[in-house]
Image (cartoon, helix red, strand yellow):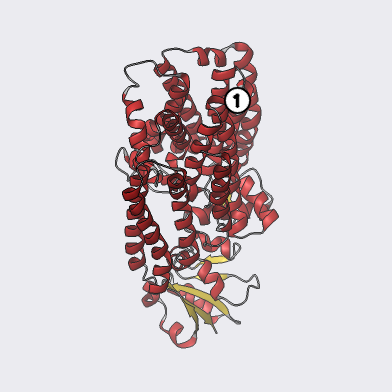
Amino acid sequence: MERRVFLILIVLVIALRLVTLGESPLFDKTEGRYAEVGREMIESGNWITPTLHGGEPFWGKPPLHFWMTAVSMAMFGQNEWGARMPGFFSYVLMLLLFYRAVRQWDGARTARLATLVLASAALPFIVAGQVLLDATFTLAVTGALIAYGDLLDRGAGRYAFWIWIGLILLAKGPVGVVLVIGAVVIHAVLRREIRGIAKLMRPVVLLPGLLLAIVIAAPWYLLAERATPGFSYYFFWQEHVLRYVMKDYGDLYGHGHVAPYGLIWAITLGGLLPWTVSLIATLRARIAGAASRKLASGDAWALGWALSPLLFFTLSRSLSMPYAFPAFGGIAWLFARSAERSGIRALSPSSLVALVILLAGGWFGARDIDLPPFQTAAILVPVAIALAFVILRLRWLKSQSIASVAIAALLFPITGTLLTFFALDTVGEEKSARVLRRAIPVDDGRPVFFFDGVPLSAEFYFRGKAVDLQGEPDRVAALMAEEGEEILIVRRSKEQYLPQNVAQAARPLAETLKYRIYITP
């Protein structure tokens, strides 16, 4: 791929992700939860124990991403932009590190294609614009894998590897270390040698390296246990062992094991759109020969990178979409290495499949949320035009070209941007409390009362002033008896449980698809 075309495409992909950061609302539950943790960190000044619900310890995750979120919101404001900037920053930094690493191994042409695939695939593009710690976690895992690759290729990176291990422990915990070790072991098995492991395990490298990782990560873990006794047991045992092996693992914040075994592979195939079909076609011959011969070190390393997260989570039934993200660097690198040798295969059909899926998803999604016809057309018509263009290319072109790569690279970023600007506000009425915040004309810092449950995003948007009346009519009656006006927000499906005098005495202020807002007398 030509350097100038690559620069234009990668800048466009990154710019499309950047301009949408503040546009869509923070969605429940995850975005609202993690943004609120960062907001409370700023408000309380407590940088040791992440908290929710006005000071309740949040033991589910380490603090690195929350630290970044708090710093970002201190710089950019307590809003969607500030909350999402850490994920975007981690995404861009990961791309820079990845490009540099692949270029050192295989040259600039391979690095350009691999980086473009990694940047523009559906899952990385989505994660980069959400309040999720998976972008930060994947950055740390990628850094560790790149450092180990440097050790294999040039004998460098031994101490950088351990620094990244320390950051992995602060980003998500021991699971990241398991993924890195898995990639190292798979590489050794495929290469039928332990040269890299031997370099890493030499006492002159291992002892200082372990000390570096301990110095980076251990102080926070010790301080966290001291601040809230019981954290270590919950985090290491329930979040990292029982969560993986038991159905009822005691998660305080999420859900039990509900996904079928092996779902991670389907998530990966979907998350690689619009490159999925082309990736399979291009990689098929090279992967088929992996068991019968000793792979080149680069192929073995990229394959270990790709397989380690997928194999690990194959037996896990507690999954979310971003769990596949750490594998994407290895997959993109394998694809680019194969394409450099034998050309990109089936790229136009791959784009065609992705476009059909996007059109079908857009149509059914628009029907589900009752999106107005104009907005539906604004999203689907440009995609349909692109679809027609791809069909014409399939008829007229006998070989792949840079134009085909450009179509694939921009397909999901452009579609995602259109969805963000034309549809997500409508979706947000069901999945976010921002619409409630905007419906209340005055923000004077007074409490806002929810009749039956406070959405996590409401805690963020109302700056910790959302109060849960827990569905108790007596508490509503007491609120009605108080002097002065108060804001009462009620799910429309729960209005039948309100005291009768609410509808008579309270003044309706606004309503959304899900809620009705009253001002009490």
**Number of labelled discs?**
1
**Residue at the bottom extreme of this rendering:** 504
Residue 291 at x, y = what percent? 32, 19
Residue 228 appearing in the image: no
Left or right: 398 with respect to 512?
left
Task: Locate residue 169: give its quadrant.
Answer: top right
Residue 451 at x, y = what percent? 46, 70
Q: Nearer the viewer, residue 221 or 360?
A: 360
Residue 247 at x, y = what percent? 33, 40
> According to the image, label 1 marks what residue?
162
Left or right: 23 with respect to 287?
right
Image quarter (top left, top right, bottom left or bottom right) of the C terminus:
bottom right
387 versus 279 height, above or below: below
Q: Nearer the viewer, residue 448 or 158?
A: 158
Residue 115 at x, y = what percent? 52, 38
27 versus 10 height, above or below: below
The residue sitting at 61% across, 20% down in the picture is: 158
Task: Locate residue 442: give its quadrant.
Answer: bottom right
The residue sitting at 41% across, 30% down in the picture is: 338
Residue 495 appearing in the image: yes
Q: Nearer the viewer, residue 351 or 513?
A: 351
The amino acid marked with disc number 1 is Trp
Label 1 neighbourhood size at 10 Å, few (<14), some (14-19), many (20+)? many
Secondary structure at numbered mark 1: helix
472 versus 263 height, above or below: below
Task: Locate residue 242: give its quadrant.
Answer: top left
The residue sitting at 48% across, 87% down in the picture is: 505
Q: Nearer the viewer, residue 438 or 519?
A: 438
